[in-house]
Image (cartoon, rainbow, N blue to C red):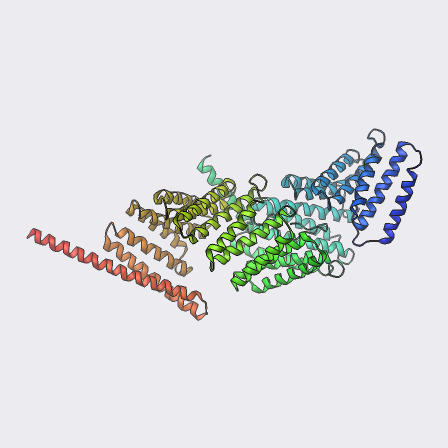
């Protein structure tokens, strides 16, 4: 097996042997000898110190190994002793790699890469094929770890290339274990790149490559022969299946950097011009989305299957990883099992799977609390918070939101922004969403302010330059928060300020989520901009802000046209609202007609048979547009249209109320209120029609008298 791996338990006899050999080497240094002999002893000292470190994790021993190897290199020049220099460089790289787990991770990984790259100038594939392959395999690991710290795409690409170079030498027949290890490392490199990539198709492709690599490794790592390696690969497969499920859903920034799964690939925790041309790009993006998802229904079925595969892989890993013999590995796989169950619960809306996820996270937490592992403890607490948030959608909203808040606050008491920026940001996201959810039903103003505070703290973790997707996604969340806060403000000035800040946040998001590169995220940000300008129009500059809202809404509609029918219909409902608001200030008849056209498009999707509730709501909005236009032309004609629309809406709301009441659904009361409001509006319409007839009758009488 290439590289040096830590043993899983401290071997007292092994440490004693290393210490005895170390003592002999240090005594020999007291004798006079030539530089090469001295370098030989320093190299042996380095090997023994590294052996002690691997046994007991002693930081000082690893540092001594590094210093000893450096002294050995003084006499091992490239010109005189190329082989010995390359061998020592290889060992120095191992020392830095091990040191990186405990101290100055980024710098130590870079030093390891540098040492191995120099060794490769001597250990060429043609002369030293096995040394070459071993070094490439280690480089695959080092670059993958570096990708998690900086220059993610570039370093993950380097990791993949190094893994492939190793596999150009290793094969399953001649070097089965080295082949399996290199395949596993290559799979992890693909998975890292998948978690960094922006485009769903790229993420899905890399996930599939990771899965294929892990499955190749399992051809060697059979359960009966290599149980621990079998369990590790099954754990990684679970992560890859879950990542692919997320990619099929088109997951974005919320997913990357905040993966619910904990990756223990190597025992550590882990916290992607002309209008005509633009349209072609959007079509290509949509074709890509369809290719990734395989259609909405098929995509949903595929995600469910991947969640089930992830669950099965975790359960197979847990056959080996028990709390007694491998507690940290057991906890990581329990966490991954919880993540897979939670993802399945999101797909099929199952409270049972959500509760099973909570149980799995609880088992992981029991280990992390006793083992004092802050990184993994924090990650699992965040996962626990996500599970409570999902539970809050279907049961005991307030209670589960408060549990999510407590989990996130406990995570924040363990890790800071400096020690774990990804975990800190995820904790703040859970706080943000919990407070926002609470604000929908209670203490709206206070909850929105707490949500805003959490969102701003999360935003402080990201920069537009280094984490553009996360930064832009957080700006969208900020826009949502300001929109909700504006609705809770008492003063006109405070509401206007919230709306302006919400609009600015949406504009910041649009700077990265461009129409060409990220059309769906761009459309979402445009609708957030519409929301901010629409609310602002209620308190100042109605005409100007309505027109800005209309422009934003039309930009979203252009993207949804022909691709996303539900979103396209919703955007037309929003457009209708803006035109009605604008009609109250200018060009009443023209803007009412535009509103009527927009609502009519929405009704083509939200039909009375397929979506009765939404259909009734649009009928009610359409009726209001008819009433508004009746103020300036043909009052009786538009009044009759309004009366018919309100009547249809009232009947639908009443029928829905009865259906929901039979199911003991509390929403039935809201449907009754909607029906009653429509009936009151019908009475108003009848009054308008009577007044119109009286006015017409008087005008007719006056005309006859005049002619007489």
- Above or below residue 56? Residue 669 is below
The front one of 485 and 50 is: 485
Which x, y percent locates residue 247? 58, 50
Q: Which residue is pictured at 21% across the width and 58% down the height? A: 691
The number of callouts visible is 0
Q: Which residue is pictured at 51% across the width and 52% down the height? A: 451
Q: Relative to residue 139, is residue 585 drawn left or right?
A: left
Which x, y percent locates residue 184? 71, 48
Residue farthest right in this picture:
31
The front one of 439 and 170 is: 439
**The quarter of the displayed image where residue 151 is located:** top right
Q: Which residue is pictured at 50% across the width and 57% down the height? A: 437
Which x, y percent locates residue 418? 64, 45
Q: Is residue 262 visible?
A: yes
Q: Is residue 394 visible?
A: no
Which x, y percent locates residue 417? 62, 47
Residue farthest left in this picture:
708
The front one of 473 and 650 is: 473
Residue farthest top in this picture:
79
């Amino acid at each position: 097996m290439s590289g040096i791996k830590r043993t899983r338990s401290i071997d007292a006899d092994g440490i004693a042997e290393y210490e005895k050999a170390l003592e002999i080497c240090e005594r020999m240094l007291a004798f006079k000898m030539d530089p090469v002999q001295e370098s030989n002893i320093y190299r042996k000292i380095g090997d023994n110190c590294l052996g002690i470190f691997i046994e007991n994790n002693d930081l000082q021993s690893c540092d001594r190994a590094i210093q000893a190897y450096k002294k050995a290199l003084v006499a091992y020049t490239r010109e005189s002793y190329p082989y010995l220099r390359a061998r020592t460089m290889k060992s120095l790289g191992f020392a830095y790699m091990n040191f990186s787990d405990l101290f100055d991770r980024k710098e130590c990984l870079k030093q390891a890469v540098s040492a191995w790259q120099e060794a490769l100038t001597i250990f060429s594939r043609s002369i030293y094929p096995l040394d070459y392959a071993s070094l490439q395999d280690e480089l695959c690991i080092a670059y993958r770890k570096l990708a998690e710290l900086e220059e993610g795409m570039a370093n993950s690409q380097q990791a993949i290339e190094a893994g492939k170079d190793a596999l150009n030498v290793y094969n399953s027949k001649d070097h089965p274990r080295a082949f399996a290890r290199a395949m596993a490392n290559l799979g992890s490199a693909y998975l890292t790149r998948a978690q960094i990539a922006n485009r769903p198709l790229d993420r899905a492709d890399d996930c599939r490559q990771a899965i294929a690599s892990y499955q190749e490794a399992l051809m060697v790592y059979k359960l009966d022969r290599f149980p621990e390696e079998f369990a590790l690969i099954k754990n990684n497969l679970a992560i890859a299946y879950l990542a692919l499920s997320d990619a099929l859903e088109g997951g974005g920034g919320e997913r990357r950097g905040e993966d619910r799964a904990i990756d223990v690939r190597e025992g550590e925790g882990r916290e992607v011009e002309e209008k005509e041309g633009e349209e072609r790009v959007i079509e290509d993006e949509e074709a890509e989305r369809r290719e990734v998802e395989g259609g909405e229904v098929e995509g949903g079925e595929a995600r469910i299957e991947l969640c089930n595969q992830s669950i099965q892989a975790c359960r197979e890993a847990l056959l080996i990883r028990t709390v007694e013999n491998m507690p940290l590995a057991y906890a990581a796989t329990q966490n991954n099992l919880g993540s897979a169950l939670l993802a399945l619960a999101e797909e099929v809306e199952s409270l049972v799977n959500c509760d099973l996820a909570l149980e799995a996270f609880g088992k992981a937490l029991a280990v992390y609390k006793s083992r004092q592992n802050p990184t993994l403890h924090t990650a699992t607490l965040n996962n626990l918070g996500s599970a409570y948030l999902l539970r809050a959608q279907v049961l005991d909203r307030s209670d589960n939101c408060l549990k999510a808040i407590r989990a996130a606050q406990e995570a924040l008491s363990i890790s800071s922004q400096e020690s774990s920026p990804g975990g800190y940001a995820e904790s703040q996201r859970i706080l943000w969403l919990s407070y926002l959810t609470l604000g929908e039903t209670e203490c709206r103003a206070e909850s929105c302010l707490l949500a805003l505070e959490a969102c701003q703290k999360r935003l402080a973790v990201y920069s537009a330059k280094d984490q553009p997707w996360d930064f832009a996604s957080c700006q969208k969340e900020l826009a949502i928060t300001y929109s909700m806060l504006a609705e809770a403000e008492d003063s006109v000035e405070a509401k206007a300020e919230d709306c302006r800040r919400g609009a600015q946040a949406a504009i910041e998001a649009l700077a990265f989520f461009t129409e060409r590169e990220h059309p769906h995220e761009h459309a979402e940000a445009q609708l957030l901009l519409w929301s901010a300008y629409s609310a602002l129009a209620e308190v100042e500059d109605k005409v100007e802000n309505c027109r800005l809202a209309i422009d934003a809404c039309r930009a979203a509609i252009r993207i949804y046209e022909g691709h996303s029918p539900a979103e396209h219909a919703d955007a037309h409902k929003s457009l209708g609202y803006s035109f009605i608001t604008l009609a109250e200030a200018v060009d009443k008849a023209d803007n009412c007609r535009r509103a009527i056209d927009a609502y009519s498009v929405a009704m083509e999707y939200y039909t009375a048979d397929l979506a009765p509730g939404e259909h009734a709501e649009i009928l009610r909005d359409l009726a209001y547009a008819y009433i508004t236009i009746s103020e300036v032309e043909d009052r009786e004609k538009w009044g009759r249209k309004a009366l018919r629309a309100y009547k249809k809406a009232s009947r639908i709301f009443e029928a829905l109320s009865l259906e929901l009441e039979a199911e003991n659904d509390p929403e039935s009361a809201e449907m009754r209120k909607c029906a009653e409001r429509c009936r009151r509006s019908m009475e108003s319409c009848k009054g308008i029609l009577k007044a119109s007839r009286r006015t017409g009758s008087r005008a007719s009488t006056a005309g006859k008298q005049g002619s007489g």
